[in-house]
Amino acid sequence: MLRFDDAWVWDSWSVDDGDLFHLFYLQAPRTPEDQRLRHFSVSVGHAVSRDLTEWRVLPDALCPAPAQRWDDMSTWTGSVVRAPDGTWLMFYTGVSHRDLGLVQRIGVASSPDLVTWHRLDEPVIEADARWYERLEQAAWPDEAWRDPFVTADPDGDGWHMFLTARATLGRPDRRGVIGHARSRDLRTWEVQPPLTEPESFGHLEVPQVVRINGTYVLIFSCDVSEIPADLRRAGHAGGVWSTTGASITGPFDIDKAELFPHESLYAARLVQDRAGQWNLLGFRNFEGSRFIGEIADPILVTLDAGRLVPLVF
């Protein structure tokens, strides 16, 4: 578990350097009376562990950029990969004061050691209006283009980026889709059509695709407030969801997504431990009306008939 008395901790992403697991996480002071305001006082924290449970805190990795930059208001969720030349790259979400924090873009920072980070001056990719809802047409409070998860193509054909995004068509409360982009060199990115249809969710946050026992698993999170009212009345709850597909790009049927059984786990991603077992690592969200704001201990998981479930010994 990772918890601070003076700071909220929520979305996180991790990378294994072969010796230590590095965890990067969003953090903000516990001072705002309304915990939702934490999203605009964020820094990206950094901790390391050998077992995904006991964490040693290191200096912060990122904070908002200086004034007038594209990411001068807040830096949000991302992912880290190692480039072929050995450089570590962190892809992250940024918002600016100029846009009142309403337009989300993806930036990148590089590091030789996962400790010292240097960001590019400009974003590397933005939403494409051919397929994705932009702010000027949004039926939503903001332009969703965030939470990049970057991974190598399994056949060696470059890299994939999966994102939280919204389609241009469909019911406003059901336009959430998994955005997609491709790159051959981790520098130049081309936006692709979404990998899912706008079906059941307002947004699909913190997406990830991994292969477990030969099956590709897509996980994402959606809070209960972003689930359409008719589905809430039918019993849909917020949390971490998963579905499976035949390849790294699906197809993924969001209508068949299953909710992971946990009271408050949110924004979880799958992490493989030293024994080769898969774990869900996320934060404790609301429990009742109380926001918890701490990284939970990892939960061992397995696939059971295509459903992601806790591994019980």
Image (cartoon, rainbow, N blue to C red):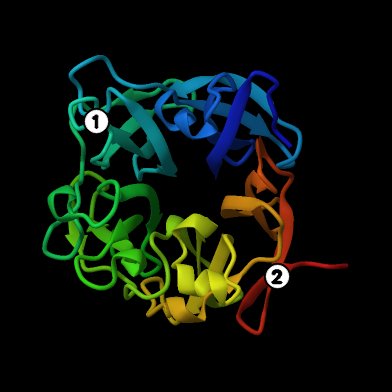
Q: Rate crowding at label 2 as few (under 14), some (14 to 19) or many (20 or more) other CA atoms within 10 Å.
A: many
Q: Rate crowding at label 1 as few (under 14), some (14 to 19) or many (20 or more) other CA atoms within 10 Å.
A: few
Q: Position of residue 138 (x, y in %)?
A: 21, 54
From what the image shows, is residue 66 above or below residue 125? Answer: above
> Which residue is nearer to you in this view: 279 or 165?
165
Viewed as shown, does residue 228 lie left or right of 73? right
In three-dimensional space, the C-alpha distance between marks 1 and 2, rounded to whole angstroms, equals 40 Å
Q: Residue furthest bottom?
A: 305
Viewed as shown, does residue 271 lie left or right of 110? right
Name the image quarter holding residue 15.
Answer: top right
Q: Amino acid at mark 1?
A: Leu
Name the image quarter holding residue 30.
Answer: top right
Name the image quarter holding residue 82.
Answer: top left
Q: Position of residue 290 (x, y in %)?
A: 67, 40
Viewed as shown, does residue 261 lie left or right of 38? right
Disc assigned to residue 100: 1
Q: Position of residue 33 (x, y in %)?
A: 55, 24
Q: Quadrant of the N terminus?
A: top right
Q: Quadrant of the C terminus?
A: bottom right
Q: Helix, strand, or loop for circle 1? A: loop
> Which residue is nearer to you in this view: 38 or 129?
38
Q: Amino acid at mark 2?
A: Val
Residue at x 27%, y 42% (from the top left corner): 104
Q: Which residue position is annotated with label 2?
A: 309
Q: Position of residue 161 (x, y in %)?
A: 33, 56
Q: Is residue 222 visible?
A: no
